Image (cartoon, rainbow, N blue to C red):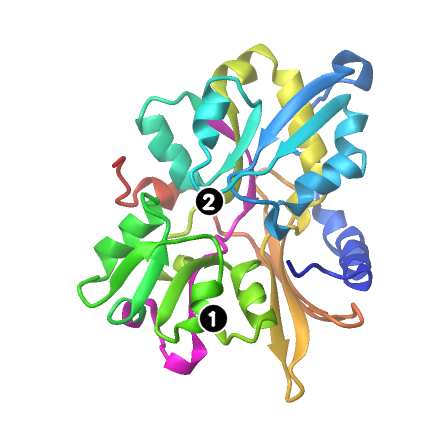
Amino acid sequence: MERMGIAVRASIGLLLMVWLGGCSKSSSGATPDAESAAGTKIKLVLNWVPEPEFGGFYAARDGGAYRRQGFDVEVIGGGAGVPVVQMVATGRAHFGTIGADELLVARAHGADVVAVFATFQTSPQGIMVHASRKLTSLAEVFRSGTVAVEPGMAYAAYLKQKFSWEGVQVVPYDGGVARFLTDPDFAQQCYVTSEPIAAKKQGGDPQVFLIADAGYNPYTTVVVTRRDLVQQKPEMVGAFVAATAEAGFAVGHAAAQMGWRGLLSRPTWRILLYSAENPPTRRGLVLVDGVDGSVIDRIVEDNPEDWSELLHEPVRPG
């Protein structure tokens, strides 16, 4: 998987400390000292295989943020069909990552899990098509060809309700880009930080339509845990959240997307940043040169996003 180089990471790190650092405040409240949680083993299960969107968790583990809180964290990679909610709800894992929409559906089914941290404020979930098809909207995507999506996902139910699927063949998503590279009429679900980059590296012509632009924009890579764990060990949960935020999620780890600019197709990282309040009050977009790591441009604005609209979306447990 494509990763940001050392120069790019250094530029982003310096930018975050200087630019967003001034408006960032601790969102965790009081946390225990290392001795009070010393040696505590924590299991964090991911809802997909290790990819860039989970980089902050690995950075917190390998960079010592979790260790400084007294935690020995095991990050468990996931994949299609991994029962994250069940693992957390039954205590097989302390924490897990899911989408905010999945959390609402899980709670509707009786799972007593709660969100304690949200990584992506704007969902990076999209539908990847071939640029050669010259499509201009998601509505056009669902008029012809084949679309691969993971069965049972709430966003798929939303898209099916919003757009007619009568003219398209829908098949299960297999987790790769092999079929996309060989079938010019094939489209598939994707994360902007993952499949489009893989397809581009292998000679494909990916174009992405964000599902958020169609009106469905839940928080993504949400850290959840059991309600009783929050009630019984609030200091431990708070310390885990604080360590995760220390790795930089709340000030910009979300939504790093590799794109291209200029006549020479110079690679450029587009990085969506958030200040560290809970919820964040500021957000920004930074363009970073993918070769030398220099900051090309940046935009800052007040953050208008919250969970309220998601609660009114027509997503029901299936």
Q: Position of residue 262 (x, y in %)?
A: 64, 85
Number of marks in picture: 2
Asked whether 129 falls inside the magenta stretch, the response is yes
Q: Position of residue 264 (x, y in %)?
A: 67, 87
User: Which residue is farthest left?
Assistant: 166
Query: What amino acid does circle 2 point to?
Result: Asp
* Residue 181 badge: 1
Compared with 282, 168 (above or below) is: below
Spatial separation of the CA atoms under disc 1 and disc 2: 37 Å
The magenta stretch spans which residues?
Answer: 114-140
What residue sits right under mark 2 in the picture? 306
Query: What amino acid does circle 1 point to?
Result: Leu
Left of 64 or right of it: where is 76? left
Where residue 187 sits, quadrant-wise, is bottom left
| Callout 2 secondary element | loop
Quadrant, the C terminus: top left
Q: Position of residue 195 (x, y in %)?
A: 52, 61
Q: Position of residue 279 (x, y in %)?
A: 56, 40
Compared with 157, 246 (above or below) is: above
